Image (cartoon, rainbow, N blue to C red):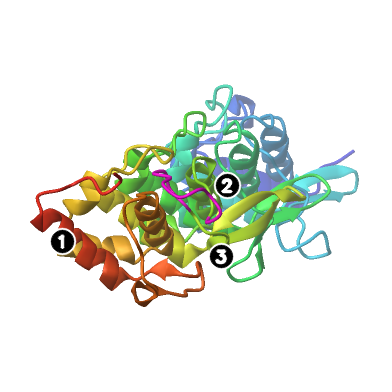
Amino acid sequence: YYIIKDEIKALISSLEVLGIDDVTTFDGTFDFNVLATEPNQDTLLSSASIHATITDKLLNLGSSVLIVPNYNQNGETLGNEIRKTVAGTEFVVKAEIKALINAFTEMGYTDLDNFGGALDSSEFFANKTVLLTSSSIQATLSDKMLNGTSGALIVPDTNVNNAASIRIVQTDVTYIDKTEIEYLIDGLDALGLTDFTSMSFDPTTIFSADFSIVLQSASLQATISDNVLTGASDETTPFGTTTLIVPTHFRENITVGGDALTYDHIEKVELQDLLEALDALGLSDFGGSIGADIITGMTETELDTMFESGSVHTTVDNMLRGNGGLTFPELAEEDTLYKLNILTEVEIRKFITAVTTLGQTNFLV
């Protein structure tokens, strides 16, 4: 058999890009430092032999390092292939190899031989725009987010806020939609949670972040909601309860991994208002008691923040009604979407003023 002339020429040009002038010295190492430009990448991949060699190295990295899918997230149809077989030889398409070279370079790697046993999750925060140009990086990161957090991260099937798909299930991989991954990376970075094996969504961690960034992600909305709702009750709870009440009006059912029965999240606007209110209340445990003395000691600005949340409004109403010494006239009540016959904000504020004027801080007794 002969190697055709065009392939020999392309192979020589490819090796020259790598700084190799003697084919017998080529050891299969691809130096990313000389592959930083697209013209050099194009020259390298003009050789089918080099193209096949790189493909083989990528496919043999192992799924703990890199998952190379058959198709991109747009579907298992012609034109979306990431892997193609030509005349019995499997290739990763050139655009994907170029995207991977750029991604690995951004992550700080200089070749295909020094990844170790797995990619560290923190490395995916390097430059999401460059990294997510690669479907393989997207598939690998999706797998880590779906299967590598020990259930700490809840990823819904669909974003109920806009009906967009989040989990994209294909024959060989399940993608998280690229836009959602971008929001997740931004949100997790804001929370300081870059290690997927050790994620804690406690109040201290959450309150340190910008909620508007965090809650762009439907997955973080679901995850934080789950942490809040674990210790919360609804509006049917007995009067006098001092833990958080999240009315059913603010709870929305979500489907996670095909499970449409187990999971709820808190409606997005209410969740942001609730987090801001709980932060103002100084809550350190989502399942902890809310102190009456904390409420009576709040400034007017803090009370403004607190009453933005219908959940906290309902909670304070319930706390007050646990005091058997108090009577609540109808004029002090109103109907809201989240609770009927609830004490008005104006009434609660006036009550707090009256109690503090009398030198009292505990309105529970």
Q: How crowded is mark 2: few (under 14 residues within 10 Å), some or many (20 or more)?
A: many
From the image, tell me which residue sits under label 1: 354
Of pointers 2 and 3, the one earlier in the residue sequence: 2
Q: Which three-letter amino acid code belongs to the residue tagged 2?
A: Leu
Q: Which residues, given as a range, are shown in magenta?
A: 235-245
Displayed quadrant of residue 115: top right
Q: Can residue 64 be seen in this view?
A: yes
Q: Is the magenta stretch mostly helix, strand or loop?
A: loop
* Secondary-structure class at tag 2: helix
- Residue 236 within the segment the image draws in magenta: yes
Place of residue 251 in the rendered image (x, y in percent of width and height, measured from the top left): 57, 59
Q: Distance between the residues labelled 2 and 3?
A: 46 Å
Instruction: Please indicate whether residue 110 sits to the left or right of residue 331 in the image.
Output: right
The number of numbered discs placed on residues in the rendered structure image is: 3
Give coordinates of residue 124: x percent, y percent: 48, 42
What numbered label is drawn on residue 345? Answer: none
> What distance separates the C-alpha of mark 2 from that of mark 1?
66 Å
Q: How crowded is mark 3: few (under 14 residues within 10 Å), some or many (20 or more)?
A: some
Residue 100's disc number:
2
Look at 64% across and 41% down and name the residue there. 146
Dots 2, 3 in contact, CB < 8 A: no
The residue sitting at 50% across, 70% down in the picture is 340
Looking at the picture, does residue 329 appear above or below residue 23? below
Q: Which of 135 and 362 is in front in this view?
A: 362
> Which of the pair 4/240 is nearer the observer?
240
